Image (cartoon, grey):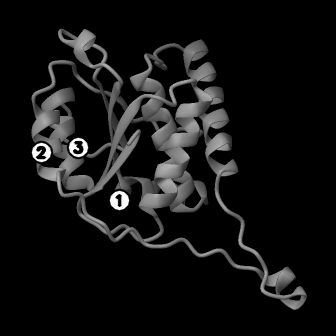
């Protein structure tokens, strides 16, 4: 399976694991990495604070962390595995309210941002930041394009169709092993902590 979605501290209302997996696959195809493997952990502020403290020495929650498997001391052994993207849905929800977007749009943007970090992108200069923001938006567009459209039941319903996002209700059987695997990484994660103009 090219994308594994794990849920911790959830379910997270408004975020469907199936929808997010479809979006992740579309993003990976958009960057020519469709045969690679990606793990995504949807969690809360408590868990991401722990990871942020361990790997970035910042004792606060952040929105997304990316743990690249192809970097660092043993990167050549990663094979098809790109790495892990960890998203705090709590932080994403706050950012979504501030940006006046729905939570799934914010989580999608964070996933795209984390995926780009796994591929070596960075935003440490203004020029790199502009390029990365453009590529993040391109990936979000690819992700939105795969979402099924709600079909009206009748002509009268055509003007009032409502799409409802299912709640993610699955919990990963291997959430504990993922945390253990992440904790032994030798490479510090890249993170998106700036929320300006996203």
Distance of mark 1 from mark 3, alpha carbons?
Answer: 13 Å
Residue under circle 1?
Answer: 90
Q: Residues within 10 Å of mark 3 (few under 14, many from 20)?
A: few
**Mark 1 or 3, closer to the camera:** 1
**Mark 3 or 2, closer to the camera:** 2
Q: Badges 1 and 3: C-beta atoms under 8 Å apart?
A: no
Q: Which residue is found at the position 10% from the left and 28% from the top?
A: 184
Q: Nearer the viewer, residue 73 or 60?
A: 73
Q: Give how far across and how far down residue 143 sits, in percent.
A: 61, 45
Distance of mark 1 from mark 2, alpha carbons?
Answer: 23 Å
Query: Which badge, 3 or 2, is on the more N-terminal residue?
Result: 3
Q: Give how far across and how far down residue 134 sits, in percent.
A: 66, 28
Q: Which residue is found at the position 52% from the left and 33% from the top?
A: 28
Q: Is residue 107 left or right of residue 172?
A: right
The image quadrant of residue 83 is top left
Q: Is residue 67 above or below residue 119?
A: below
Q: Is residue 194 left or right of residue 150?
A: left
Q: Give how far across and how far down residue 80 sits, in percent.
A: 36, 24
Tag 3 secondary structure? loop
Query: Which badge, 1 or 3, is on the more N-terminal residue?
Result: 3
Residue under circle 2?
Answer: 177
Q: Is residue 121 above or below residue 184?
A: above
The residue most toward the right is: 155
Tag 1 secondary structure? helix
Q: Is residue 24 above or below residue 99?
A: above
Q: Which residue is found at the position 60% from the left and 59% from the top?
A: 101
Residue under circle 3?
Answer: 60
Q: Badges 1 and 2: C-beta atoms under 8 Å apart?
A: no
**Mark 1 or 2, closer to the camera:** 2
């Amino acid at each position: 399976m090219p994308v594994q979605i794990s849920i911790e501290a959830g379910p997270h209302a408004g975020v469907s694991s199936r929808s997010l997996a479809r979006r992740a696959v579309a993003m990976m195809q958009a960057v020519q990495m469709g045969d690679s493997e990606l793990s995504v952990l949807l969690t809360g502020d408590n868990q991401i604070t722990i990871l942020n403290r361990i790997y970035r020495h910042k004792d606060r929650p952040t929105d997304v962390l990316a743990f690249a498997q192809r970097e660092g001391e043993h990167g050549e052994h990663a094979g098809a595995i790109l790495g892990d993207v960890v998203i705090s849905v709590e932080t994403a929800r706050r950012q979504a309210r501030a940006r006046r977007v729905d939570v799934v749009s914010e989580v999608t943007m964070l996933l795209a941002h984390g995926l780009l970090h796994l591929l070596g992108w960075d935003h440490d200069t203004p020029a790199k930041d502009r390029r990365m923001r453009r590529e993040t938006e391109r990936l979000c567009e690819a992700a939105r394009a795969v979402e099924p459209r709600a079909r009206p039941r009748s002509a009268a319903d055509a003007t009032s169709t409502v799409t409802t996002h299912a709640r993610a209700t699955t919990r990963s059987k291997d959430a504990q092993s993922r945390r253990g695997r992440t904790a032994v990484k030798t490479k510090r994660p890249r993170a998106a902590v700036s929320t300006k103009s996203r």
